[in-house]
Amino acid sequence: MQRVYLTAPDSPLGEAVSTMLRAAGHDIATEVSRADAIAILDDAYGDSLVASAESLVGRTAALLDAMPASVKRVVVATGADVYGEGPAECTDCGHVRPENRPNDVIAPWEPRCPRCEGPLTPAGVREEERVQPARPLSALRLSREDLLLAWGRSTGLGVCSLRLFEVYGPRVLTGAIHGMASLIRNNRAPELPEDGLQTRDFVHVRDAAKAVVLALTNARAAGQIFNVGSGKGSRLSVVAAAMVMARGAEIEMKPTGEHRRGDPRHLFAETMKIRHTLGWKPEVALTVGVGEAVALGQASV
Ligand SMILES: [Zn+2]
């Protein structure tokens, strides 16, 4: 039995983690001083870079400064946005990693092979691949992860970082699925940047919570970084169409033809590491989760 302190117990992820921990016989500590494990789940940022740095990095540093000796494990739930543009396969060059696209990118949207300029097939990103955050906030998340892992190495305590892909589900008010569901429930067309054929990796909040619980309770997680995603790239237009069908509405979808600054074209997880090391695998199918998102939208109208 562990006493776990959560930095954001009331967040959608925090609630799901608390429920699972209690069900598994663990306790939730209301103060750090009474904890023997900590889950850093907050992802709050401010309206300036200084405020965001304070929120993401400063508060983590303060937590480490005041770390009680009873704490043996720390898990941070961070974002897969640290990767930037995902890797790909080139028929001539093999596994390659395109750079992030420029902010003024226009169609054709697909990245080309950085070696031969040939066409590419998107591939899942592995944990050891280069990070290339496209946004300052992603760089701050990476700084927080670096700080925690370095602290773990220097103290010998088990720190684990979970790089969550697009988390969605009840009460999650960020991300593409929430944005599309809230438009579709008002019979409006979901917003599809570019041509809508970009891929993302969606993971339900309950599956994300299960990864946090495993990272807190499995000794093999110490010192590791794990991707938490479905391991599949889903095209935004396909997900949007599934949501429109689940809603039973007739909505014509029109991609915006515009790039959103910092957005990768393709980013999805390679999840072999967490599957093999922690025995984690996602259980909520995207079709089920998408139906749930639309139904929740209808309930809250
Ligand atoms: Zn090539």
Image: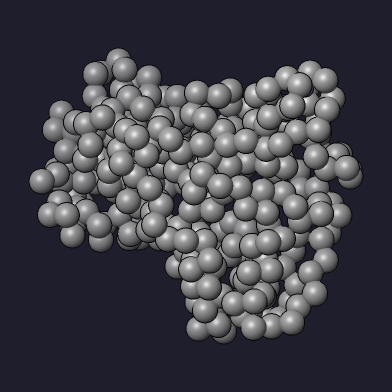
At a point 81% along the width and 33% down the height, the residue shown is: 119
Residue 258 x %, y %: 84, 52
* Left or right of 111 in this view: 279: left
Residue 257 x %, y %: 86, 54
Quadrant location, the C terminus:
bottom right
* Left or right of 113 in this view: 220: left
Residue 63 x %, y %: 32, 34
Q: Out of 270 and 174, give the one closest to the viewer.
A: 270
Residue 134 x %, y %: 67, 34
Extreme residue in the front direction: 91
* Left or right of 247 in this view: 37: left
Extreme residue in the top direction: 154
Q: Out of 44 and 256, give the one closest to the viewer.
A: 256
At a point 30% along the width and 38% down the height, the residue shown is: 278
Q: Is residue 45 above or below residue 14?
A: above
Q: Is residue 174 above or below residue 250?
A: above
Q: Is residue 268 above or below residue 283?
A: above
Residue 169 visible, this angle = yes
